[in-house]
Image (cartoon, rainbow, N blue to C red):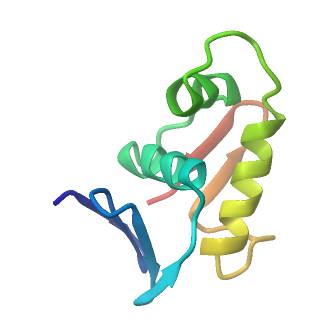
Amino acid sequence: DESLTFGDIVLERATREARKGGGEVRLTAKEFDLLWFLASHPRRVFSRDQLMASVWGYTAALDTGTVTVHVRRLREKVEDDPSEPKYLETVWGVGYRLAA
């Protein structure tokens, strides 16, 4: 079983479960995929286009607002203070990264 941990967040790939401080965090399939992808590459910055290609499988320039919405929803679910994220960071003008 493959799992990833950052802070008090644990992701279990086989069961697609997320836990924070021992409690379950209910994520959609794409939220889990996005969080798993970022957690698999800690500290690496990805543009919205790169995330669309890697997580959604789209290579054409589509609405990257989808990424923004998913990151916002993930912050609401896993961050203690979504307005001051300590895990899901925005790198202005570039994209997003998971600060591990």
Left or right: 4 as drawn, with respect to 80: left
Left or right: 19 as drawn, with respect to 53: left
Give the percent coordinates (x, y) of residue 98.
Answer: 52, 53
**Could you say which is closer to the camera, residue 12 or residue 46?**
12
Which residue is rendered at x = 16% and y = 60% of the image?
Answer: 1
Q: How many marks?
A: 0
Give the percent coordinates (x, y) of residue 42.
Answer: 41, 48
Farthest residue to the left: give it. Answer: 1
Which residue is rendered at x = 57% and y = 73% of the image?
Answer: 26
Give the percent coordinates (x, y) of residue 93.
Answer: 78, 31
Which residue is rendered at x = 54% and y = 77% of the image?
Answer: 25
Which residue is rendered at x = 56% and y = 63% of the image?
Answer: 87
**Could you say which is closer to the camera, residue 22 or residue 15?**
15
Vertical placement of 53 versus 2: above or below?
above
Vertical placement of 17 versus 93: above or below?
below
Give the percent coordinates (x, y) of residue 100.
Answer: 43, 60
Farthest residue to the top: give it. Answer: 60
**Could you say which is closer to the camera, residue 70 or residue 92?**
70
